[in-house]
Amino acid sequence: MNLEQYKVFLEKKGLADTTIKSYIYTIEVYTESNVITQKNLLEYKSYLIEHFKPQTVNLRINGLNRYLEYINRKDLCLKTIKIQQKSFLEDVISLADYLYLKNQLKNEGNKKWYFIVWYLGATGARVSELVKLKVEHVKIGYFDVYSKGGKTRRLFIPKRLRDETLNWTDDQQKDSGYLFLNKEGKTISSRGIALHLKYCAKKYGVDPKVVYPHSFRHLFAKNFLLYHNDIALLADLMGHDSIETTRIYLRKTSTEQQQIVDRIVTW
């Protein structure tokens, strides 16, 4: 089995780097103790269902199916499992906590993390996209993101954020290159951002459960619909293939649902 050739196959499919790593990991784990037969694949699927969350199960199944496609055994492909969609959003940072976290970072002069939080909350960027943001993108006000299947979505940078960022980069005498670097002066990693956000949450007394990169993307979507109720535009901004995916942001968080029930149910 040549995983390097398989990696090239996945790259030609236009898959994201994180997806490719996940798919290769899936095959490495599976082939450690299994050969590819229908019986073994079905048993492995049962094992996944018993031990992992539905999203992880489907990620592993998709990884296996891609490999089966690669070796011309699509007849063995597995069906993904149906995920019951919840009627509410969970663990989404509130606007108040987002603004508080942002202000605390600014007040302490921690400009890099102040801007990281602001960009996550004000652009709807995925963290894997944010780490590729450059000063050149800030200057023109947008960042064209190329996703799987050769699709392009434009990630817009709001004017106030753009102006403050350029003041910051001017102070640093930074005219080009990646916007966010680590302590070694290299491009910061997605994992590095996720871990430091948890640290900031604990430091400033915000629930760490709601402080993670994708939570800010949820915040962006919910607030966008609150101020501009155009779900088709939001779907484009978020890079969703279907408006059905975007409809989840019309829902309330479980905390918001509880507050509404507490307020109106007095009988």
Image (tube, rainbow, N blue to C red):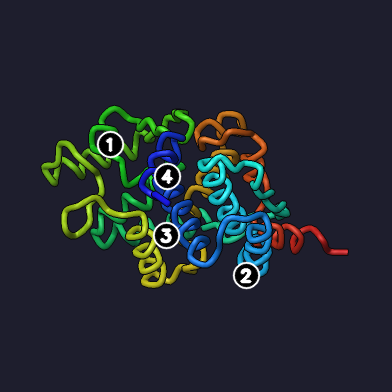
- Closest to the observer, 105 or 213: 213
Q: Is residue 223 above or below residue 204?
A: above
The numbered dot on residue 51 is 2
Q: Which residue is mark 3?
A: 100
Do callouts 1 and 3 mark residues in contact (Cβ within 8 Å)? no
Q: Residues within 10 Å of mark 3 (few under 14, many from 20)?
A: some
**Which comes before the other along the chain, label 1 or label 4?**
4
Q: Residue furthest left?
A: 173
Name the residue: 43% across, 71% down.
205
Q: CA distance from mark 3 to mark 2?
A: 38 Å
Q: Which residue is mark 4?
A: 6
- Closest to the observer, 222 or 10: 10
The numbered dot on residue 65 is none
Q: Amino acid at mark 3?
A: Tyr
Image quadrant where residue 266 sits:
bottom right
**Which comes before the other along the chain, label 3 or label 4?**
4
Q: Residues within 10 Å of mark 1 (few under 14, many from 20)?
A: some
Q: Secondary structure at mark 4?
A: helix
Is residue 218 shown left or right of residue 118? right
**Which comes before the other along the chain, label 1 or label 3?**
3
Tell me, yes or no, if residue 12 can be seen here.
Answer: yes
Q: CA distance from mark 1 to mark 3?
A: 21 Å
Q: Is residue 148 above or below residue 195?
A: above
